[in-house]
Amino acid sequence: MFKVMLMKIGIIGCGNIAHNIAKSFQVQAVYDVVMSKCEDIDANVCNNVDELIDECDFIVEAASPQAVIDYAPKIIEKGKDMLIMSVGGLADVKFREKIFTLARKNGAHIYLPSGAIGGIDLIKSAKVAGLKKVTLRSTKNSKTLGYDVKERTLVFKGKASEAIKKFPKSVNVSVLLSIVAGMDIDVEVYADPDVKENIHEILVEGDFGEAEIRVRNKPSPQNPKTSYLAVLSPIYLISSLNDVIRMGV
């Protein structure tokens, strides 16, 4: 178990990611609309989010995009730091700017883990000189996406702002990439009956040159619907909060 100094961790949503975080850190409190999901986590079970906010100073959202919309404003207004897993909840630009403004006003920090992709540091560095284009190509099993196809098929091509509306559970990473890049990135979604893993390819073009990042995610051992890397990402992020040495951008 990792030790994070002077931090009372709370978690909203007691699914696979929450359980893995609770195995890695001492968690102060948890909340889920289905309270039975919280029973095997060693933490105080709160009756509502307000109780959790009062008990904790670092809150992890691991529930849904709607949970971000419902709870992020009150968490940030209290000056509490927040890690957001369901980045799709920040798809609306006006809401996103509202949350970011609240964080600046109240001295709170918002953490968006890289989740099931890589290349975030590269994009941030490249943006300094200027980005021209960022494209995300996501390939998932056709049944997962709800398509009956015989071979790899392009089922969506457009902007991230539209992709997240059509695939709210499948392209959260497109919203993250848009936030990092500072633009509404291009997205292509492919349905493939023969793949078992989620595959994300990120193509970056800018004054720095070009880059291609490809991630083929194995599913989480506890929940095949979640990429294993998406589970590991917040664990590392939380463990690094007290690091004296910072690596990468």
Image: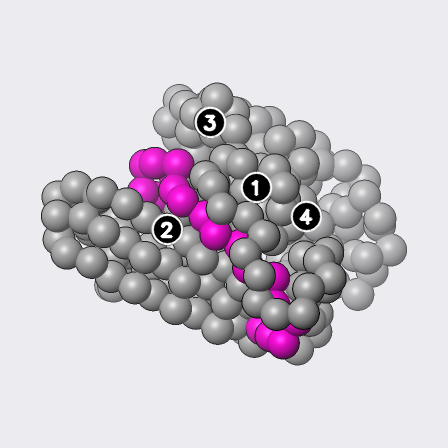
Of badges 1 and 4, nearer the viewer stands: 1
Q: Earlier in the sequence, mark 1 or mark 3?
A: 3
Disc number for residue 135? 2
Residue 155 location (% of width, % of height): 58, 52
Categorize mark 4 by other alpha carbons within 10 Å: few (<14), some (14-19), many (20+): many
How far apart are the alpha carbons under marks 3 and 4? 21 Å
Categorize mark 1 by other alpha carbons within 10 Å: few (<14), some (14-19), many (20+): many
Please state which amino acid type lies under the numbered disc 4. Answer: Ala
How far apart are the alpha carbons under marks 3 and 2? 19 Å
Categorize mark 3 by other alpha carbons within 10 Å: few (<14), some (14-19), many (20+): few
Nearer to us in this view, 242 or 175: 175
Disc number for residue 80? none
Marks 2 and 3: in contact by CB < 8 Å?
Answer: no
Q: Earlier in the sequence, mark 3 or mark 2?
A: 3
Of badges 1 and 2, nearer the viewer stands: 2
Magenta region: 179-197
Q: Is residue 242 visible?
A: no
Task: Label 4: state its secondary structure.
Answer: loop
Disc number for residue 93? 3
The quadrant in which the N terminus is found is bottom right
Q: Quadrant of residue 220?
A: bottom right
Residue 183 located left or right of residue 93: left
Per the image, the residue denoted by label 1 is 164
Nearer to us in this view, 50 or 155: 155
Tell me the residue at 13%/53% (across/down).
208
Nearer to us in this view, 148 or 114: 148
Marks 4 and 3: in contact by CB < 8 Å?
Answer: no
Please state which amino acid type lies under the numbered disc 1. Answer: Ile
Disc number for residue 63? 4
Residue 226 location (% of width, % of height): 63, 64
Task: Label 1: state its secondary structure.
Answer: helix
How far apart are the alpha carbons under marks 1 and 2? 14 Å
